[in-house]
Image (cartoon, rainbow, N blue to C red):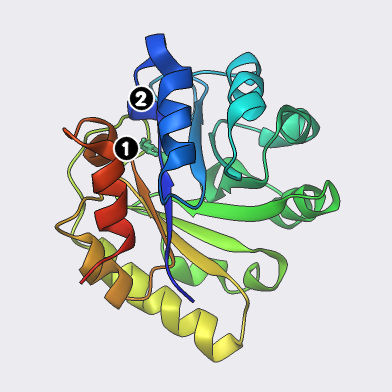
Amino acid sequence: MDHLISPSLLAADFANLGKDVLMVNRSQADWIHLDIMDGLFVPNISFGFPVIEAVKKISEKPMDVHLMIVDPDRYLTRFRDAGANILTVQYEACTHLQRTVTEIRNLGMKAGVALNPHTTVSLLKNILPFIDMVLIMTVNPGYGGQSFIMESYNKIEELRKMIDTGGHNVLIEVDGGIDTKNAAKLIGSGVNVLVAGNSVFSSDDPLNTIKRLKNLS
Ligand code: DX5
Ligand code: ZN
């Protein structure tokens, strides 16, 4: 399959959020990525339900919602009702992960599991049959604009092998420090979905940057 692009709204202009969402609508992006931070799991707070609901009203792209919050089970139904299509929880934030991802699917969403840079992919072996996507964090979560961690390539290749040998129908998404320079190598390593924040929204021509990320040569 062709790889997918999911621009991260964390790097958008929050005073003109509608304008940036409409830009994503017009672009070749496949999804739109929303980062939810609670100030506990990560040392930053982003935005919550009112903003997700407002984006949902005008977004024509599936909403790829990345939860960086403790105990996400408390809010799964609310994220579904707010408009999430793909809901990703952090591995490190879930004590009963199989229950959490099963509930996400039962609510009608795709279920993703995100791994912090220090968390090994081998821990996913017994959860792969129950999920639709793994998000490899290629920076420590909490902020946009950080540098890509090079060790991520080894994790991606190891995970690609686990998914293929097990015959699982699971996408690999990467998030953090993704740009037009490292995108092709990431896709070559087995990535299916690229999240990009600053490289898109801080560029002179965001539409063209999305196009370049989508059409790698
Ligand atoms: C970081 C978030 C990312 C962030 C990526 O914790 O999960 O989605 O927006 O931003 P860039 O692409 O600027 O590294
Ligand atoms: Zn994210």
Image point 58% across, 74% down: which residue?
125
Percent from the top left, x then y, of residue 85?
A: 68, 45
**Dot 2 lies on which element?**
loop
In the rendered image, the residue lying farthest to the top is 15
Q: Residues within 10 Å of mark 2 (few under 14, many from 20)?
A: some
The single residue placed furthest to the bottom in the displayed view is 165
Q: Which residue is at a point 28% across and 32% down the rendered structure image? A: 201
The residue closer to the viewer here, 28 or 109, is: 28
| Picture coordinates of residue 191, whole percent (x, y) | 38, 68
Residue 12 is marked as 2
Tell me which label, 2 or 1, sits earlier in the chain: 2
Front-most of 151 and 170? 170
Residue at 32% in and 37% down: 197
Q: State the residue in front, 11 or 124.
A: 11
The three-letter amino acid code for the residue at tag 2 is: Ala
Position of 53 relative to 144 (above/below)? above
Neighbour tally class for label 1: few under 14, some 14-19, many 20 plus, Cα within 10 Å: many
